[in-house]
């Protein structure tokens, strides 16, 4: 597989292109205008498409054969016999970007062709320009500084992002009742990175609504910072090899993982 240092350079180029393509759209009516239904089954807006088109141009110009899985277009192969897969969410947090809320990101992961082996993850906040990245086996970084998860193991002092307020309310009710703080920011990729950097203690989403594009990069970054990621029942999370399948996730600092799973199961 290609050198991972080249992946960081490519991600930064992709981020720059997405930033240039979307900065004038943020907070405007054009940002939220409906364009079409995306390959993942959700609406594609003007700002989504602008970000994806800009990043695709960068990936195509790179010249290496690759397979791309992206939220809007679905699957695209560039060249013959792709060397790797790119899992792309060109704009994670579309509502935030459309409304001018400064919490939306570019999320890019590089993996083996079938996604069984995540090699590099990159998530960068387009509003605040905070850059998270991780290479498998080499730790996780925020703006070039190594990060690690929190050491918090006390349920009563946890700050957790919990999605499940409309669906599967019964499974999440115990978490809401037993932790100190709940925060919902609206960009899953960034929220996973917040767990990785100790800003949050855990992330829980049991709606079975997450796509591989939402979580691939953030999962690697979190695991490389010392965190733990499973499905909603404590089993190994298998990333689906398409943009239509949905998964659920529990991601934590590792110290509170079993406690959160017990709360979800009613134990």
Image (cartoon, rainbow, N blue to C red):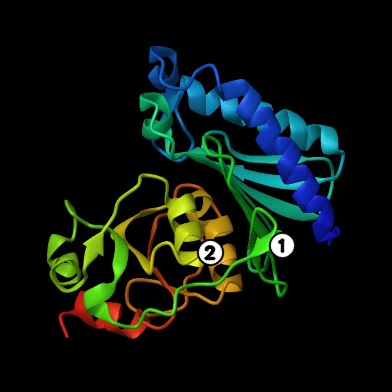
Residue 210 quadrant = bottom left
Question: Is residue 152 among what the camera can see?
Answer: yes
**Which one is nearer the viewer's eye here, 189 or 266?**
189
Can the viewer see residue 53?
Answer: no
Mark 2 / mark 1, whichever is N-terminal = 1
**Residue 247, percent across and down?**
39, 60
**How far across and down, in percent of the image, does residue 115 sit?**
63, 62
Q: Local crowd at mark 1 within 10 Å, few (<14), some, or many (≥20)?
A: some
User: In the visual, does 118 lie left or right of 162?
Assistant: right
Residue 170, quarter of the rendered image: bottom left
Q: Which is nearer the eye, 239 or 58?
A: 58
Residue topped by disc 2: 219
Residue 75 location in percent, x, y?
Answer: 62, 41
At a point 63% along the width and 30% down the height, the residue shown is 18
Is the residue 242 above or below the residue 36 in the image?
below
Question: Which structural element holds mark 2?
Answer: helix
Residue named by callout 1: 112
Please say if 132 is above or below 99: below
111 relative to 165 in the view: left or right: right
- Cα distance between the residues tagged 2 and 1: 15 Å
Indicate which label's residue lies in the foreground, 2 or 1: 2
Is 156 located above or below residue 43 in the figure? below
Indicate left or right for 240 with 79 as reference: left
- Horizontal and vertical percent for residue 179? 21, 71
Quadrant including the N terminus: bottom right
Crowdedness near tag 2: few (<14), some (14–19) or many (≥20) residues, C-alpha within 10 Å: many
Q: Residue at x 53, y 67 (%)?
A: 222
Left or right, 141 with reference to 158: right
User: In what quadrant of the picture does the C terminus appear?
Assistant: bottom left
Residue shown at the point (42%, 51%) measured from the top left: 188
Q: For the residue labelled by badge 1, is the local secondary structure a helix, a strand or a loop?
A: loop
């Amino acid at each position: 597989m290609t050198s991972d240092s080249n992946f960081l350079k490519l991600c930064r180029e992709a981020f720059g292109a997405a930033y240039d393509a979307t900065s004038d759209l943020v907070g405007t009516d054009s940002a939220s205008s409906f364009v079409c239904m995306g390959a993942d089954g959700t609406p594609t807006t003007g700002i989504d498409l602008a970000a994806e088109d800009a990043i695709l141009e960068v990936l195509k110009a790179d010249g290496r054969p690759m397979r791309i899985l992206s939220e809007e277009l679905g699957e695209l192969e560039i060249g013959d016999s792709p060397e790797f897969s790119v899992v792309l969410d060109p704009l994670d947090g579309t509502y935030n970007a459309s409304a001018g809320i400064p919490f939306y990101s570019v999320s890019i992961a590089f993996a083996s062709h079938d996604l069984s082996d995540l090699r590099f993850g990159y998530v960068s906040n387009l509003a605040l320009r905070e850059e998270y990245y991780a290479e498998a086996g080499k730790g996780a970084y925020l703006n070039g500084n190594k990060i690690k998860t929190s050491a918090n193991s006390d349920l009563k002092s946890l700050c957790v992002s919990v999605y499940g307020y409309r669906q599967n309310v019964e499974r999440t009710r115990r978490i809401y009742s037993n932790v100190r703080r709940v925060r919902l920011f609206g960009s899953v990729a960034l929220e996973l990175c917040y767990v990785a950097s100790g800003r949050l203690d855990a992330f829980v989403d049991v709606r079975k609504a997450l796509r591989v594009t939402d979580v691939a990069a953030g999962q690697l970054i979190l695991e490389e910072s010392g965190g733990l990621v499973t499905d909603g029942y404590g089993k190994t999370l298998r990333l689906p090899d398409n943009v239509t399948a949905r998964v659920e996730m529990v991601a934590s600092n590792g110290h509170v993982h079993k406690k959160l799973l017990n709360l979800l199961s009613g134990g």
